[in-house]
Amino acid sequence: MSQRLKKMRSVLAKQGLDALLVRTFEGDSNNVYYLSGFSGSAAVLVITKKKAFIVTDGRYYMRAQKEAPEFKLVKVKRGSRLTEHINEALTMAGLGKTSKVGFESDHLSVHFAKTWCKEIKAKLVPTVHLVERFRQCKDSCEIELLTLACKVTSRVFREVAPLIKAGMTEAEVAFAIDMRLRKHGASGNSFSTIVASGPNSAMPHYATGQRKLKAGEPVILDFGGVFPGGYCSDLTRTIFVPGKKPQAELVKIYKIVLSANKAARKALKPGITWKQYDKVARDYIEQHGYAKQFTHGLGHSLGLAAHDPYDYEHDPFQEGAVVTDEPGIYCEGLGGVRIEDDLVVTADGAERLTSAPYLRV
Ligand code: GLY
Ligand code: MN
Ligand code: MN
């Protein structure tokens, strides 16, 4: 954590800020966790050039002291205002009315921003993605945790795939997946498990339902867990329900999607942009006649969130980025295929963290 705090302070200096406020926001506590180690759901970090405070309430006093030992605890008392205690921390750091204090503008509602500007005794300055920027590239400890998350998730696929039979409902398959994710160490799902069968597989983000699987049809299984350290996995495999030969066009589509997935993985390396990465898979799918049926981006950053922050438009890949590679082809009425792997960008290429097998078609 001290390395992360150090990096954050160098950004404060560059931005001409005396302090930065980092707040948990509507269930998103990732920036607070990333900088401090505190994993609870309500806190504000006050990071100054020399000091660091964690402002939290009675539910979290002990946990904050234990998880964020580099931060001095400022206790929010029952019945008092959070802003009073942010002011208390700023005063302890020797900051006042003329100090420039950054806040994360996309982690504060308009209502909160107005209140903070009125009640916090400093000049508040909106900032954008200062912490998110650091989260784009993972350090070796994060890569180790993501590797483990992907390994376990791949194991869940290997365990569940042979159990899938005609007559099971999508929800039953999802339950079998979720149960094994938890059994093997996930504290929860990184998003709601998608089991999309038959015609439903033509919807990329289908909401798993009660439809019964039929022999020979495609089923998209897209799932992931939140694993130790808070890191997420995100895996998709498409299978064909045993008992009947799948339709020839779906088998053809499967081969195209798998080749597009592999081509993108081979192309991924430091220095290329997300647009270039996406284009590799998109061009391949286009050459095979399904451009219009690949209706989403090739992938996204993965980390403390299943869709981790990344400046997709501006920042080329760097070593340590962890991303998904998930081309898909979706044909209304027929069905769809998506194949998703999680990759880490290395010095001269990319490695696959997910090891779930593909179909041999
Ligand atoms: N399941 C969400 C995604 O693959 O992005
Ligand atoms: Mn996914
Ligand atoms: Mn994904």
Image (cartoon, rainbow, N blue to C red):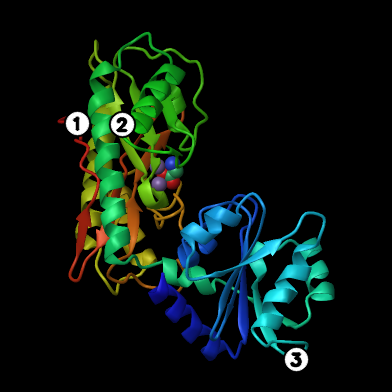
Q: Secondary structure at mark 1?
A: loop
Amino acid on which the number 1 mark rests in the picture: Leu
Residue placed at 24% from the left, 12% from the top?
Answer: 244
Res. 29 image quadrant:
bottom right
Q: Relative to residue 256, is residue 344 depicted above or below?
A: below
Image side of residue 150 versus residue 127, left or right = left
129 or 4, which is in the foreground? 4
Amino acid on which the number 3 mark rests in the picture: Thr
Amino acid on which the number 2 mark rests in the picture: Thr
For marks 3 and 2, give the CA distance. Answer: 58 Å
- Asked if the beta carbon under badge 3 is closer than 8 A to the nearest atom of ligand 1, the reply is no
Q: Which residue position holds label 3?
A: 98
Residue placed at 43% from the left, 53% from the top?
Answer: 297
For marks 1 and 2, give the CA distance. Answer: 8 Å
Which residue appears farthest toward the right when viewing the image? 118
314 or 6, which is in the foreground? 6
Image side of residue 218 versus residue 99, left or right = left
- Rate crowding at label 2 as few (under 14), some (14 to 19) or many (20 or more) other CA atoms within 10 Å: many
Looking at marks 3 and 2 on the same chain, the residue that comes earlier in the sequence is marked by 3
Q: Which residue position holds label 2?
A: 238
Looking at marks 3 and 1 on the same chain, the residue that comes earlier in the sequence is marked by 3
Q: Which mark is residue 359?
A: 1
Look at the image and tell me in which quarter the C terminus lies.
top left
Residue 235 on image: x %, y %: 33, 41
Look at the image and tell me in which quarter the N terminus lies.
bottom left
